[in-house]
Image: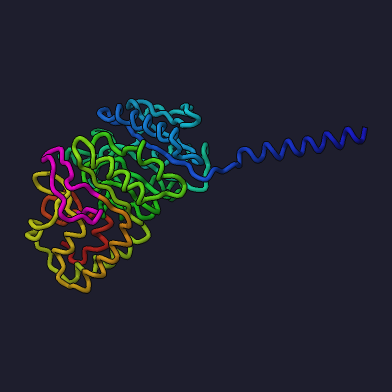
Amino acid sequence: MRLVIVVCVVSLLLSCHKNDDEPDRINTQTVIFFFPYSADMTSYFRRNISDIEAAVLNGAFRNERLIVCISSTKDRADVIELRDNKRDTLFHYDNPDFTTSADISQMLSDIIKTAPADKYSLVAGGHGTAWVPADVKNLSKSFGGYNTKTGVENIAYAIQNAGLKMQYILFDGCFMSNVETVYSLRNAADYIIGCPTEIMIKGIPYQHCAKYLGSEPDYDGFCRAFCEYYGSYDTPCGTISVTKCTELDSLAAIMKEVNLTVDFDADILDGVQRLDGYKTPVFYDFGDYVSHLCNDRQLLARFAEQMSKTVPCKVHTECFYSEQSGEIRIDSFSGLSVSPPTESNIRLGVLETAWWRETDVLNL
């Protein structure tokens, strides 16, 4: 009888230990793919998901959990895990409002409870206009959908409110490698990956690039694979860069010094590399802008050195593509765009961004 009791107690203890371990199991990396509702892009999002699955079959994401949140309609968002060549629907939301930081934060919090990890990364798909406020209607793009876009600050707040700091945020959308944008997100991620120009509607070619986005990302490999793909595309146009967020405060400090030494003259912009095709440009190449703005060689050298630390990876094809203007040649490329305080950009509120509040000593 005593032997039977001992065996039962030991078995119970072992059983309890096993059950306790299961909910506490932490995987290395959870990659969150976020596709908010956008009527004209839903079919492309679905294709993106299929391309991600194809990449997994070819060896990508061997040790990571892949969670997808996709709103196929305005009224519903499904949270799906891609695993073992199948899709498991984990839960869904009715009438989500992903224009608010609260709903995005709740989504992130629910995912990290379901798929806890040592590290998290976010891939966000949709239209993009970088820092331009979400209520601006006169631009052809937006983050999210045309009527369901959200501001960059909301994304930053949502990530931080969920208690997260992403290993990387990859923006699968237009114009998001922009200094005003990445500066607003500097405390929400270690790295920001994105395009400083428009990107083709196909978006990131995940079947070629996803293998570089595991728990130990190869950012240079990712950028090269992206450029190789779009270099041989029907319209051979593509730009991509990686920003190291811990270097952004140092970059802002040097930019503040630059602004102390000059009086801004909008006429210089005629010679600066533009990175959009709008009739009145919004986005210019950041490095080229500073080289036209500042005449102090030593300060320019310090700026260039800091830019190389801040943007460790950047690639581009010979031209970028604009929906409004077609192909535009790239003669100068630093990996980040900037929106100088022109009359139109001031009206849009560029000086209200965190970047300009920190660096605009002239109070233009």
**Left-right relation of 112 to 184:** right
Left or right of 209: which side holds 143?
left
Q: Is residue 91 above or below residue 242?
A: above
Q: Nearer the viewer, residue 153 or 261?
A: 261
Report the residue at 42% width, 49% height from top.
217
Whole-percent x and y of residue 259?
19, 67
How many numbered markers are drawn? 0
**Where residue 305 appears, x then y in whole percent?**
28, 66
Color style of the picture: rainbow
Decide whether residue 287 is among the magenta residues: no
Magenta residues, as a range?
316-338
Tell me the quadrant of the picture where the N terminus can be found: top right
Residue at coordinates 38% horizontally, 29% vertically from top-left?
50
Residue 235 x, y percent position in the rendering: 18, 37
x and y, in percent, of residue 332 in the image: 17, 56
Quadrant location of the C terminus in the rendered image: bottom left
- Tell which residue pokes out farthest to the right in this image: 1
